[in-house]
Image (cartoon, rainbow, N blue to C red):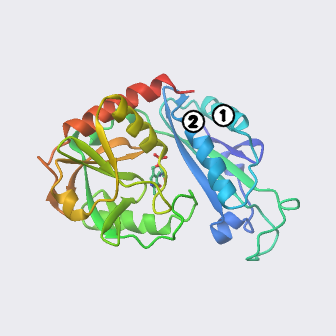
Amino acid sequence: MTRIVYVNGHYLPEAEATVSVFDRGFLMADGVYEVTSVLDGKLLDFPGHALRLERSLAELDMASPVTPDELLAIFRELVAQNGVTDGMIYLQITRGNPGDRDFAFPDPASTPSTIVAFTQSKPGLADSPVAKSGIKVISIDDIRWGRRDIKTVQLLYPSMGKMMAKKAGADDAWMVQDGFVTEGTSNNAYIVKGGRIITRHLGHEILHGITRAAVLRFAAEAQMVVEERAFTLAEASQADEAFITSASAFVMPVVAIDGATVGSGTPGPVATRLREIYLEESRKTAL
Ligand code: PDD
């Protein structure tokens, strides 16, 4: 079965789903994206992703080519046409194709934005065996730009970080700026100490994770104590537990940082419980 991809209002077989070489997403990384998980054919945390998309677009002076309702309809159609049970939807919106290469933003009246969305099927996504063993991370310098709260497609450094991790025999990297952990290459970072969940406060330094927001809400509802503040690698090395969150990994335990085990070296009770709660609760509100 050939995958059906959405491009600017059309549902096309993937071989026919193309954009121009002059597209600013291709030439300038002038675009934003969202990753939304699909479980049992339904979209997790859709309103949060739609809201963050609008914010990313607004921060870059890009008009939204679709309303949240239209986006929901597109996502549902893609899930249906591709028969996705578990997996994800990738959405990208760029400043479009002005027909030439120019640094100045084109006039949106003559250059409509480009919108592309596709599915990736991942059967058994929620039952990942990795969640039972946990992942290992290394630390790397955070040398990304200063507006990480905007979900842009500039993912070269996060890709390099993943490769550095792989080379070091680890699964991912946590990025560090001025001595404090910012976030993972494609996820938010947490430690647990004495029952307290610690994760960096919101700001321009990190992406405002939709999974983060949900997990912190569920943690508070379960009477867990949450501290939103920066933490150091030294503090992380003394933590009882560590974990990450993202739309694709949900809540994923971290069992080693820079080769040293965290806590017992196995997934801890807080991360394990939060993963269960997140999956249970977000399935209930899936659209
Ligand atoms: N990444 N921080 C960064 C740098 C991210 O790229 C992501 C998401 C997150 C977590 O955000 P959310 O919970 O909304 O997924 C944090 C997606 C999954 C990706 O690039 O594939």
Local packing at callout 1 (Cα closer than 10 Å; few below 14, some 14-19, many 20+) is: some
Q: Position of residue 41 (x, y in %)?
A: 53, 27
Q: Is residue 12 above or below residue 58?
A: above
In the rendered structure, are the residues bearing label 2 and label 1 in contact, judged by CB atoms less than 8 Å apart? yes
**What's the residue at 16%, 52% (across, down)?**
262
Q: Quadrant of the N terminus?
A: top right
* Nearer to me, 27 or 275: 275
The answer to whether residue 108 is seen in the rendering is yes
Furthest residue toward left:
264
Q: Position of residue 6 (x, y in %)?
A: 69, 44
Type of the residue with mark 2: Phe
Q: Is residue 93 visible?
A: no
In this view, 78 is above or below 260: above
Residue 189 in picture, x, y percent from top left: 34, 53
Q: Between 104 and 24, which is closer to the camera in this rendering?
A: 104
Quadrant of residue 250 in the image? top left
State the SS at label 1: helix
The residue at which mark 1 appears reads as: 72
Which amino acid type is marked by label 1? Leu
> Which residue, as the protein is rendered here, is positioned at the far top?
284
User: What is the spatial separation of the Cα atoms under label 2 and label 1, in whole angstroms?
Assistant: 8 Å
Residue 131 position by quadrant = top left
Q: Which residue is mark 2?
A: 46
